[in-house]
Image (spheres, grey):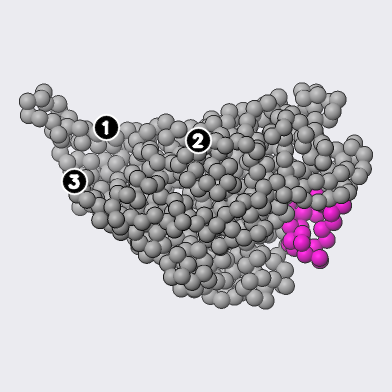
Amino acid sequence: MKDNLIKYLFALTLTLSLFCFSSCKKYLDKSPLSDISDTEAYKNFTNFQGFTEELYNCIPLISTQDYHNNWNFGEDEMWEIGETRLLAYAIDQGDFWGWNTSYYSWFKTGGNGSSQNRGDKGHLWGLSWYAIRKANIGIANLDKLTDATQEEKDLIAGQLYFFRGWFHFMLMQYWGGLPYVDQVIPADQPIKLERLNYQQTADKAAEDFQKAADLLPIDWDETLIGKQTLGNNNIRINKIMALAYLGKDLLWAGSPLMNRESTGNSDYNKEYCEKAADAFAKALQLSETTGRYQLADFSQYSQLFYTFNQSGKLPGLKESIFTENLIGAENQWRWNQVNDYRPMTIDGSGIKVNPTANYVDYYGMKNGLPITDPASGFDPTHPWKDRDPRFYHDITFDGVKCVINGGNVGNDDHRQYASLYTGGLYRTANGNKAVLTGYMETKFVSQYMNDWDGFKDNNVFILSLMRLSDVYLMYAEATAEGYGTPQSKASGYGLSAVDAVNKIRERAGVEDVNSKFLNNINDFMGELRRERAVELAFEGHRFTDLRRWLLLTESPYTLKKAVEFDRDMPDEDIYADPVNEKVKNFREVTIVERHLSQKHYWFPFLTSDVNLYPGFKQNPGW
């Protein structure tokens, strides 16, 4: 990373020198730096890579850009009532202008790639357009890279094409079709690029992702130039990344929302899904044959999301393919977001957030069936028994021990144990900061979440924007919809759609998709969507998934619920074995119902942007 920073700073200095001194008048004192020609930044790999490094710095920081951030906007989380600074609150109210007006939002305008300030990294809109222009400048100057091998030229070009496609993709999945900027627009000329529809924009991005995949290696460590930074190349853009995002771009283009925006048809577009499946198949086949990316063992599942007391080690293992910005990774989590997942009774700070009861319901049984299936064995008098193992990893339920040393928080009321039953301490203390939903989240933090035993410090959390498990599930969706059945396979790949889902379930110790869901696409898609909800829970995917499936405005996805129940056995027995707790009066109640309309499937553009020129049109309803 130090080598990367040195290269980046060199490029920044060089670029600033070029721009600042090119406009100097002759009568000004001449600086030695003004002798640098306009080809210097691009003449060899070292210089050009220094220029390119800034694109990595434009990747947004989503999880902890500020003291508290929020990135789950579906029906998955409930933040404390009345906390108006959060974009999640604005989304619940139908105020999608909040993407730029909410204090805690990672979508905002502004920002540039040169800043090393963490607070400048939560600006998807501003950073994306900045990065797209920079990528275009680089592509326009590829012919100046003369002092370089073909491998070095390919590495530079591949990164530039990838980032141009990726930043367009990141924008269009929230705002819809865009002008695809694939040229350097002179500052003194009017902009005339009209908005394309979603699929037209996706086609342009797909061309860039494909170019990147054709040019880039699987592993930079295996290249001659990469051996100079051996062991520090993990986040470099590579062939598998490009293929995986090519597949994601095409699957999104083929999804019901995007197909409707482009063609008026609200079904999946089978042609796009088939092409997406083929791209995912290539990425997965390369991962499996080379070992470049691998599913982590379930015993290491926590390390996909956070590390604790591991000397600042980054989480993700070999499963993480693409992550948020790493700026300040060694300490960005410890004082901020981590507090939000702990109840006030054991931590006196934070804006509190908890998983909704209806979202927790997606965690089915170990036998692979949803809890709503009569054959699942789910028992509302023993609701925590025999659940999907990921339930026990991700969710804290009633009776679970949350504090190692109970004396630090007061043994007299057993507050070291989660009191999440109706009327329990965690549910009633501290007003709006109480655990409103009856569940707490431990996917991103240790179960022992109190300050007193040191679990606040030495946490490192990085949000993966794409994991290998996500690619398997996207492959399953694209293959089933593109090739027609749950048993279908993409060209040249051995796994069927259902095989890919089962591969993720098997890692977690969950039985395969039941045969009753394999008779038609609709039944299979119900289980696939539930699998995505569980495996990718709270990782920022749900909001876009609900939107692209045209489910955001449909009940029950508009509801956020709490679970209510009474204990039906002695407290001490519950604390000794919470999984087998017996309860009574088990039920769910609605906390929030969102009233959203068709316009809420897309974010609105700022009025100042749509007024730039006639071809830049506002999204419908805004």
Residue at left offset 7%, top offset 29%: 26
**Distance of label 2 from label 3 (alpha carbons):** 34 Å
Residue 267 position in % (x across, y down): 53, 71
Name the N-terminal-most of marks 2 and 3. 2
**Distance of label 2 from label 1 (alpha carbons):** 32 Å
In front of the other: 208 or 110: 110
Rate crowding at label 3 as few (under 14), some (14 to 19) or many (20 or more) other CA atoms within 10 Å. few
Vertical arrangement, residue 82 with respect to residue 604, above or below: above
Residue at left offset 73%, top offset 54%: 361
Which residue appears farthest toward the left when viewing the image? Answer: 27
Name the N-terminal-most of marks 3 and 1. 1
Q: What residue type is labelled 1?
A: Thr
The tag on residue 109 is none
Vertical arrangement, residue 37 with respect to residue 362, above or below: above
The tag on residue 188 is 3
Residue occupied by mark 2: 103
Rate crowding at label 2 as few (under 14), some (14 to 19) or many (20 or more) other CA atoms within 10 Å. some
- What are the residue bounds of the magenta stretch? 364-389
Residue occupied by mark 1: 13
Residue at left offset 57%, top offset 31%: 336
In front of the other: 14 or 137: 137
Quarter of the image for residue 249 reads: bottom left
Residue 524 appears in the figure: yes
Q: Dot 2: what SS?
A: loop
**Dot 2 and dot 3 residues touching (CB under 8 Å):** no
Q: What residue type is labelled 2?
A: Tyr
Quarter of the image for residue 368 reads: bottom right
Closer to the camera: disc 2 or disc 1?
A: 2
